Each structure stands twice: as C-alpha cells, then as structure tokens.
Image (cartoon, grey):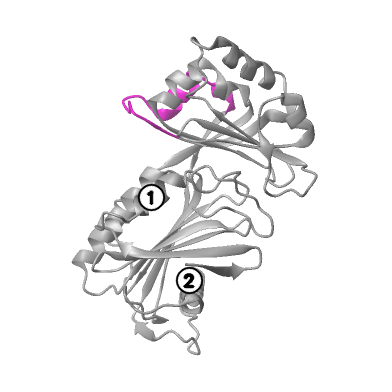
Amino acid sequence: MTGDMAAGSKVIFERSCFNETKSRHLKYIDGHNINHKVELILPNSDSLPEVVAESCPVLDQFFLVRGLPVLEFVKEEFVNKILKRGHFTALSVGTRVDSHNVVALLPTGHLILSVDKDTYQELGLQGRPSEYTGRKPTHFVIDINLFDVDHKSVPKQYERVVWSLTNRPGLDMNFLCTWEPVDDNQPAISQIASVLDRSKIEQLPLTSCTRCSGQATIPELTSQQPLDGDTVLEAYNRIGGLAYSPGDFHLRSSLPSIDVKDIVCASWTGMITTNRIHQMLSALRSLMKSSSNIPWAVLTVHGFDDSPVSWDQKEHGFDVNGCNLYTFVVFPNDDYWLFMGIGAKDLCP
C-alpha cells in the first residue's frame, strides 16, 4: 500500500509475520545500507529492558576520514584488505545530493557517484542521467561494482577506472564510514589505517538520547486491525510523533487510543550498520514475546537525507525533504507492520 506522506514524499505500508516464509523484513534491512539514526519506542516502560539495552549500539563507533580521494576506494589493496574482508560502508558528507558531487561505497562493493555534468564528462565513465533532473540532465549517476573490476584478468578495465579517478580535486571528500571486519582480532581502525592515511582518520562515538515520559495517550494498535490508506498514514504520523512528543496524542484522531503509565523513547545517531539493526529488531521480538505489558514496540531507522541511494542501490534524491526511512511496529504475536518513507521520485523498494 502506497500513499502520500507529505509534500515531496510517499509512504509504503506492508504487514506480515516475522516467521512467515514470504516475509521480506530481512531484505528491506539488508537493502538499506546507509543509516544515520535508529529510534526505539516502548509504551508501558520506564527504561530500556535488559534484553533490548544489550542489543543497542551503546559502544559502536564510526569513522570520519578527511580529504580522501575517491581513487583510494578503487585501489587493489583497499578492495582486497577491506571490502572483501567484511562490511564496509562510506558516504561523503558536507555535500548536497541534488546539486553537488556525492559518493557512497556500499558493502556490496558498489561505488556510487552522483555527480554534476562537468564532472561526469571529465570522468568519461558510463553512467545515466539522474531521475532528479529535467529534460536536459545536469546530474548523473555512475555505479562501479568494485568486485567486478578485475585487477589482473581485465587490467585495461581497472586501469580505465583508475585513470578516470586520478587527480580529480572535486572528488577529494570527507567520508563517514563503518567497518565490520570478518577478522575482529585487530581493532577496526587499525585495519583501516593499514590501507588509508591514519592521520586523516578520526574515530567517533554515536550520540544517544533516552527519555521517559509519564502517563501518555497512545494509539491502540493490533496487528490485524482493518486499515485503509487514510488510517495507514494517520497511524504512521501518530507513531512518528511519539518520538518527539510522547504525551501529545490527539484525541480527535480516528484511531482508538489507550492510556499508558509511561513510555520510553531512545535514539542513537551517527552511522549505524545493518547488522546492528538486525540485532535490535531481534531483541525487540524477544521482548514482545516475553512481556505482557507492552502492547507494541517501534523501531525506526533513518537514512541520510543526502545519500545517493536508498534501498537496493536505487537512486535517492533530496528533492523537497530527503525522506529516507523505515519503521517496524512489532506486536506480541510476532506480527509486524512496516512503513517505508521515501522521496516522491524514488523507486519503491
């Protein structure tokens, strides 16, 4: 089910059961690689239960790499020592996806360059016009699969990419990165520093916020209650509003409501890995199966507004508001609702 969420964006709704063989929840998490923030909402809780708290990214860190030429990602040493030995994600920061050059590197090995017309012509690499430009394209998207760029058997292909990316000052950028190595015996930053210039790498902690509100009125939700396009959007907006104003549920809503004695909202911001999202969702499911007091729980994952991709390497543009997120509502019977908010011109996952 798809509907308008706000000007310049749309919401997609699905519901299923986590144990259903056709459930696509794993696909949606794995396909959304570049995550900026994760939020939890637990009604009838005054703190994060232990099973959930242990899954949260309290000690997770990410990296800021300053002034890094995109060329470094293409080099054989980086591909073999980093990309092929874990899950590495990078996104250029301080750039606007609709008007500047923006670069992302995904754990799948795909290097995505969203570049202006001048840069595109200078690079001479195959790409396509952005969906976010008009009849006369001013922005282009280049997708290079670094796992397919064979350094030995097809050297000319590799040399062509290297030549195109060499000495391109407009592609020296600051990057946010996460790195989950298969071999975790050595600190992640040490492994990255063995390939990239250590002086350019800064290790950063996630910022977190947890707050508990007293008695609150929340929507009364059950996994199989009838929903149409209007009530889907209303439920989505009410759930989203709880993260910012937990006690401000409007009684004039067409959705039924219930009072809870307290509600806890927690968030972590920085760069979040898909593996961490899997762990948090699994913990929520365990909690809901064992708790009789929590009617439903919410996990929301925000992508970066200026990421060049959203799901499955599909193009993302800022357009009006950069909407790029998804929300799971988890029920005690292991059913779930899933809302996905994307830009009006973004392709559906």
> Looking at the picture, how far across and down is residue 201, in whole percent?
55, 29
Mark nearer the N terminus (2 vs 1): 2
Question: Residue extending furthest bottom?
Answer: 252
Q: Is residue 167 above or below residue 1?
A: above
Which element carries disc 1, helix, strand or loop?
A: helix
Q: Residues within 10 Å of mark 2 (few under 14, many from 20)?
A: many
> Looking at the picture, how far across and down is residue 256, in whole percent?
40, 86
Q: Which residues are magenta?
A: 179-200
Type of amino acid at the residue the image marks with label 2: Tyr
Cα–Cα gap, marks 2 and 1: 20 Å
Q: Is residue 225 shown in magenta? A: no
The answer to whether residue 225 shows anywhere in this view is yes
In this figure, which residue is indicated by the disc labeled 1?
277
Question: Residue extending furthest front?
Answer: 135
Residue at 48% across, 71% down: 236
Residue at 56% across, 24% down: 73
Tell me the tag on residue 236: 2
Q: Residues within 10 Å of mark 1 (few under 14, many from 20)?
A: many
Instruction: Name the quadrant containing residue 345.
Output: bottom right
